[in-house]
Amino acid sequence: MNLPIELFIMLAAPLLIAAFLLRGDARRFAAFFLLGLGACLFAAYINSFLSLAAGMDIQEATIKLTPIIEEVLKALPVFFYLAVYAPKRGAILAVSVAVGLGFATLENAYYIMNIADQSLLYAVIRGFSAGAIHTVCAAILGYGLTQIYRRQFLTFPISFALLCAASTLHAMYNLFVTSGGVWAATGYLLPIAAAGIMLPFLRRISVDEGLRERETPRID
Amino acid sequence: MHSDLFLNIDYIHIWIQLICYAVCSFIAARRAVLHPDIWRYKILTGAFLCYALADLFWNLYFTIKWEYALFFSAADLSWIAVVVFLIAACLNIFNELTDEERLIVRRYRILSVLISFVLIASTHAVMVIIAGGLFNNICYGIVYFLLVYFSLQLWLAARKDIRPQMKNYHGAVMLFVLCDIIMFLMSCFWETANISMVFDMGLTIMPVILLYVMKKEVCA
């Protein structure tokens, strides 16, 4: 058996058990984190297959193909959640971020076991850059979906547009990182900068949700 | 020499365009906060941000690799997202119409389909024949067709007193599409490549025009 599958099983097994033991928000988070791991596993195979089929080298595929495939696969569990359940506004963002985190976790684990430079510095850089870019891109989609929560007729166009924007941001990160030198250093800072820009918007959703919960009377 | 000068002007112009769209997205976001009931400000914020993101990717790719990110790059994804955001704005306007207003708007659908199909299909067919890029042209063609179809219907209805204050907005959206299509068309011919930049400069001021007509509409 190859490394991505072994890593997936190792990471997924405890989460699967936890998903059965937990309840409510914690269970949902564990389940969608698990789906994020699955999306990453699928992405690894689909990326390899499509880049071979399109005759692209690794660098070209990393910039042109990989971002689109990864963003679409990360979005699928979120769309499933929206279509099947009737989620709360804040839950959409949480689910989207959980999928992104799961994706980043498996990808980072795979990269750190595959490269020769297994230094602490590389782990820190990788964790804060590649880990953050998946989370930020997933949060972009989640944020957009929370905005159109009460306007279902906009779900398709806005989701599509946000997927495109997230793919461009991801491609930009990949372009920087694969270029090496100063560009790579700039690329490592890009996800942190994007997260910083998104933070006030995301906090606003959390505050709105908190206020709504406080306004709703509790029935004991 | 002539070609180098053209490339330099184009390169600088895209940075200026990026700044223009980024500033306009900030202004649109501010107005979205001031007028939370006008949803189009939120959608325009997304559209302008996507345009700025696409410009950023396009110029960074050129800076790093010394070649244009031609024929379906990540920048194209964001440019398509801009059009999809504008389609979402049209759908939002459709949703706000009353049943009587919707009936009047629907009278123009056949005329709108014909005009938009002839305009988009013919120009994109010319571009495919001259410059190739079938997939690229199909993607742009579909979204442009939908945007012109919706905008034209609403513009024709606005001339017959259905939300007449929005007439200028729909006109500006169609001008945006026209500028973009003529720019693409001109860039296919080597002799008219310089003229394409004039239309590209037209696209640079489009967010300002869109925000201006929106402000006029809100004040009216």
Image (cartoon, coloured by chain):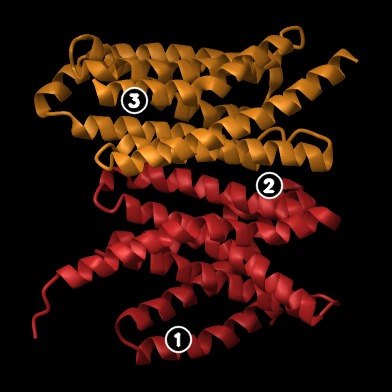
Q: Chain of mark 3?
A: B
Residue annotated with mark 1? A16
The foreground one among A86 and B170 is: B170
**Residue B127 x %, y %:** 63, 17
In the rendering, which numbered label is found on residue A64? 2
- Image quarter in which the N terminus of chain A is found: bottom right
Does B58 sit above or below residue A169?
above
Q: Chain of mark 2?
A: A
From the viewer's perspective, is B169 left or right of A141? left
Q: Mark 2 and mark 1 in contact (Cβ < 8 Å)?
A: no
Circle 1: element type = helix
Q: Which chain is orange?
A: B
* Amino acid marked by disc 1: Leu
Q: Mark 3 and mark 1 in contact (Cβ < 8 Å)?
A: no
Q: Are marks 1 and 2 on the same chain?
A: yes
Q: Residues within 10 Å of mark 2 (few under 14, many from 20)?
A: many
**Residue B163 x %, y %:** 20, 20
Residue annotated with mark 3? B215
Picture mark count: 3
Does A80 sit above or below residue A156?
below
**Residue B119 x %, y %:** 47, 12
